[in-house]
Image (spheres, helix red, strand yellow):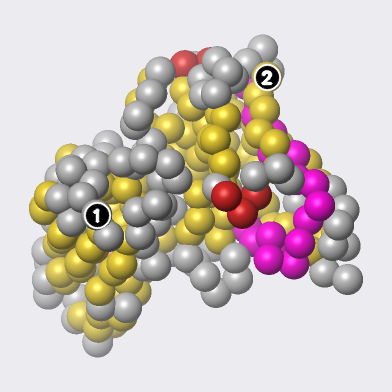
C-alpha cells in the first residue's frame, strides 16, 4: 500500500527557512517523479515543484524559483522541499504527491498524496 | 502559461441527480487533462486523467470528456460522499496548473 507522510511544517517568521520532508513507502520510489503541491487558506491547489525520478531534473513554479529547492534520496525513499526566504504568501498546507506514471517525462498527474503539512509564515 | 477556468464556482445538486462540471483552458491542452476530488481535511484524490481515463478504484459514475480547450466532468447519480470540491489540472507544459475548483454541495 502506498503511503506518503510529510513532516517539517510549522510557524516561522518571514525571511526564515524551513525544510519539509516526505517519507514514502509501498512503491519503487526511484521509478517515480515526485511533486509538492500547496493550498493556501481558502484558496485552490497550486503545484510548486517537481523532481525527476533520478533527481537530475527539477522544476518550480515561478513564485518560488530561487527560494525553494527540491531534492530526493532514493536510498531512503524520501524527498524534500527546502524553503528559504519565506514570505507570508507561502503560508499553506503543503502536500507531497507521487506521479502517476513510472519514468515520466511529460506526464504529470498525481495519484497518491500525503495528508499535508501546514506551513505558516507570520511575524 | 496555460490558465484553467472552471464553471460554475458552486453547483447545488440533490443526491441521486447528475452533476456536470466544466473546465476551460486558455489554449489547447490536447487531451492532457485530469480531475481531482478534494474534501476538507483530506488530500486530493485523482479521479480522471487524460480527459476520460478513470484512475484506479474510481466508480463508473465519474466520467470525463472533451478535447482541446473544453472539458467536462460528469458525476451520475450523486452519492452522499461525492459532495466536495473538484479541480481540473493540465499537464501540457510547465507549470502543470490547476483550475480554481468547483464546489459541489447539497441542494
Q: Residue at x 47, y 65 (%)?
A: A44
Q: Residue at x 31, y 41 (%)?
A: B92
Position of residue B23 measured from the top left corner of the image (x, y, whole percent) = 23, 63
Numbered range of the magenta stretch? A77-94
Position of residue A119 measured from the top left corner of the image (x, y, whole percent) = 73, 57
Q: Residue at x 38, y 36 (%)?
A: A108
Q: Which mark is residue A1?
A: none
State the residue in front, A60 or A30: A60
The Cα–Cα distance between marks 1 and 2, rounded to whole angstroms, is 37 Å
Question: Residue B39 lies in what quarter of the image?
Answer: bottom left
Residue B47 placement, left or right of A104: left
Residue B21 placement, left or right of A88: left
> Local crowd at mark 2 within 10 Å, few (<14), some, or many (≥20)?
few
Residue that carries the numbered disc 1 in the rendered image: B27
> Local crowd at mark 1 within 10 Å, few (<14), some, or many (≥20)?
few
| Disc 1 element | loop
State the residue in front, A1 or B101: B101
Q: Residue at x 47, y 23 (%)?
A: A32
Asked whether residue B31 is drawn in magenta, I would say no
Question: Residue A8 lies in what quarter of the image?
Answer: top right
| Disc 2 element | strand
Q: Chain of mark 1?
A: B
For residue A91, above or below residue A73: below
Amino acid at each position: 500500500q502506498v503511503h506518503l507522510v510529510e513532516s517539517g511544517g510549522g510557524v516561522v517568521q518571514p525571511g526564515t527557512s524551513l525544510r519539509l520532508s516526505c517519507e514514502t513507502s509501498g512503491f519503487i520510489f526511484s521509478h517515480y517523479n515526485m511533486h509538492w503541491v500547496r493550498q493556501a487558506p481558502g484558496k485552490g491547489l497550486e503545484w510548486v515543484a517537481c523532481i525527476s525520478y533520478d533527481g537530475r531534473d527539477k522544476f518550480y513554479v515561478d513564485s518560488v524559483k530561487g527560494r525553494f529547492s527540491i531534492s530526493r534520496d532514493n536510498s531512503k525513499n524520501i524527498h524534500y522541499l527546502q524553503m528559504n526566504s519565506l514570505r507570508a504568501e507561502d503560508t499553506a498546507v503543503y502536500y507531497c504527491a507521487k506521479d502517476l506514471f513510472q519514468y515520466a517525462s511529460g506526464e504529470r498527474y498525481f495519484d497518491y498524496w500525503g495528508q499535508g503539512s501546514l506551513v505558516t509564515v507570520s511575524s | 502559461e496555460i490558465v484553467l477556468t472552471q464553471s460554475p464556482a458552486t453547483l447545488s445538486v440533490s443526491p441521486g441527480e447528475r452533476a456536470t462540471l466544466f473546465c476551460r483552458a486558455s489554449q489547447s491542452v490536447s487531451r492532457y487533462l485530469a480531475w481531482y476530488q478534494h474534501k476538507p481535511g483530506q488530500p486530493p484524490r485523482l479521479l480522471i486523467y487524460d480527459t476520460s481515463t478513470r484512475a484506479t478504484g474510481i466508480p463508473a459514475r465519474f466520467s470525463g470528456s472533451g478535447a482541446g480547450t473544453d472539458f467536462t466532468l460528469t458525476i451520475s447519480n450523486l452519492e452522499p460522499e461525492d459532495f466536495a470540491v473538484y479541480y481540473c489540472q493540465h499537464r501540457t507544459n510547465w507549470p502543470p496548473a490547476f483550475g480554481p475548483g468547483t464546489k459541489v454541495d447539497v441542494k
